[in-house]
Amino acid sequence: MSLSGNLKTVSFPDILQLLATGKKTGLLEIRTASRQKEVAFRDGNIIHASSVNSAEDLLGQMLLNRGRLSKKDLDRAITLHKQTGRQLGTTLIDMGVFDKHEIAECLKQQIEEIVYNLFSWKEGEFLFHENAHPKSAPFLVELSTMSVIMEGTRRIDEWLEIQKVLPPDDVLLAISRSPRTNEEEFKISVDEFRLIGLINGERTLPDLINLSPMGEFVTCRAIYRLIVNHLIEAVGRREQKNQVEEDEEEAVLRIVFRLYNNAFYRIRTLFEEYLGEDNTTFATFAAQYRGNLLNFFPGVDPKSDLMPSFDKFLAAVQAIPAPIRFQTLFRDLDDALAEQLQFIFELLGVGAYRDGVTTVKGEISEPLATRRDLVKRYAIEENFNQAVKRSARVVKMVRG
C-alpha cells in the first residue's frame, strides 16, 4: 500500500482511519523541518510510537516529570544504559526500580501522548512504510486505532474550549480566597487535586505544566476546570527584570539551539544510514564533546538519553560571562559542526560528505526564518555558513 502526502491535504485522523480499516502493518513516518514522529501498526492497531529529536517524549524525562522516578535513579539508569547498551526501560527493570508491567504501562502512556499530539499537527509530510517495523521497541502495546481516533478528536474539540479560559503565560495563579461554591457542589477530580498542591500564587501556567505529574493536555484541562469552578484565580503577573534584553537573548539562543540541533541530528542519522545504528565509530568520535555545551544536542552523543533540553542549554550558556558569551558559544558550535562534516569525508568519502552538507543546509531554513532581524544582527547564518565553508576548504585541500 502506497500512502504518502502532506497533512495539509489529508488529516492525521483520516490516515489512521485508512490504516485501521485496511488492517495494515507497517510504520507511519510524519515529519516537518524540525520534528519527526513515527507510529507503528500491526493489523491496523497501534503498537508503538516514538519521537525523533524531542525531549518531552523521552521515557526517563516523562517518569521524572511525573514523580515516578528520582533524579538520582534516572542518572544511575542512564549511566548503566550507556555502559551496557540496553534500553532505558529494561535498565530500570534490571535495577529493580520498576517491574515489567509498570514499564509497559508507562510506555503505553508515553505512546498515547505522542499519538494524541499528532492530532494538532496541521502540516507535515507523511509516508507509510508497509510491513516495516520500529527500529528500537523492546516493549510493544496494542491500542485500538478507532478508539484513539475518537479520543484524539474529542481532545481537539475540548482543547478549543480550554484555550478560551487559560490565562496568559505570565499570569500567577493561586487558590481562590473566596471560592464561589458551596460544600455540596465542591467536587474535584483526582487530576485537579494533584494540581492544587502545586498552585501557590508564585507559579504560572507554564510552570504548572512543567511540574505536573500529568501530560500537558490533562494538566491544562484540570486548570481549566479549577478556573471555571472559581477554585483558583489570577493574582498578578510575574515581574520581568530587564525583559527586553532577556527576551532578545533567549530568542537568539532558541534560534541557535534549533539550528544546530537540526544539523547535528542530520549528521548523526547520516552515519546511521551508511554504517547502521549499531556502529560505534561515530559514538567514539562524538565522545570528545561530552562535558560541554554540546551535551545538549542528540547528534553529539547518539547513545545518550539526555536528549535536547533548551532550558538546560539556556542555563549553561548564561553561565558563560556575558562579554564573551556569544563568541564562546559560536566558536564551540561551529568547531563541532566543521569537525563532524570533515569526519564524514574522512570516514565515508566525498559523496557522503556532499550528502551531509546538502542535508544540513536543508535543515536550516525554518530556524533562520523565525526572526530574520535577530539572525542578521547576531550573524547566526553567517557563522553557520562559515563552519560549512571551513569544512569544504579542508576537504578541498585533502583532495588536492
Image: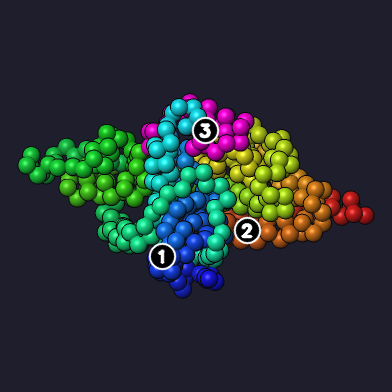
Camera-side residue of 140 and 212: 140
- In magenta, the rendered stretch is 66-92
- Name the residue carrying label 1: 20
Residues under labels 3 and 1: Cα distance?
A: 33 Å
Query: For the residue marked with disc 3, what is the amino acid?
Result: Thr
> In the rendered structure, does residue 151 fall within the stretch colored magenta?
no
Provide the secondary structure element on which disc 2 rests: loop
Query: For the residue marked with disc 1, what is the amino acid?
Result: Ala
Q: Position of residue 214 (x, y in %)?
A: 34, 42
Label 2 crowding class (10 Å Cα cut-off): few <14, some 14-19, many 20+? many
Q: Residue, x 33% and y 59% (percent of image)?
A: 147
Q: Which mark is residue 366?
A: none
Q: Position of residue 135 (x, y in %)?
A: 58, 50
Label 1 crowding class (10 Å Cα cut-off): few <14, some 14-19, many 20+? many
Q: Which mark is residue 363?
A: 2
Q: Residue furthest bottom?
A: 9
Side of 315 where 165 appears, left or right: left
Q: Residue, x 51% and y 36% (percent of image)?
A: 90
Q: How many marks?
A: 3
Side of 51 where 105 appears, left or right: left
Residue 373 in sight in this render: no
Q: Residue, x 67% and y 44% (percent of image)?
A: 278
Q: Mark 2 vs mark 1: which is more N-terminal?
A: 1
Q: Mark 2 vs mark 3: which is more N-terminal?
A: 3
Q: Residue, x 50% and y 40% (percent of image)?
A: 311
Provide the secondary structure element on which disc 3 rests: helix
Location of the C terminus by quadrant is: bottom right
Residue 230 in sight in this render: yes
Q: Which mark is residue 91?
A: 3
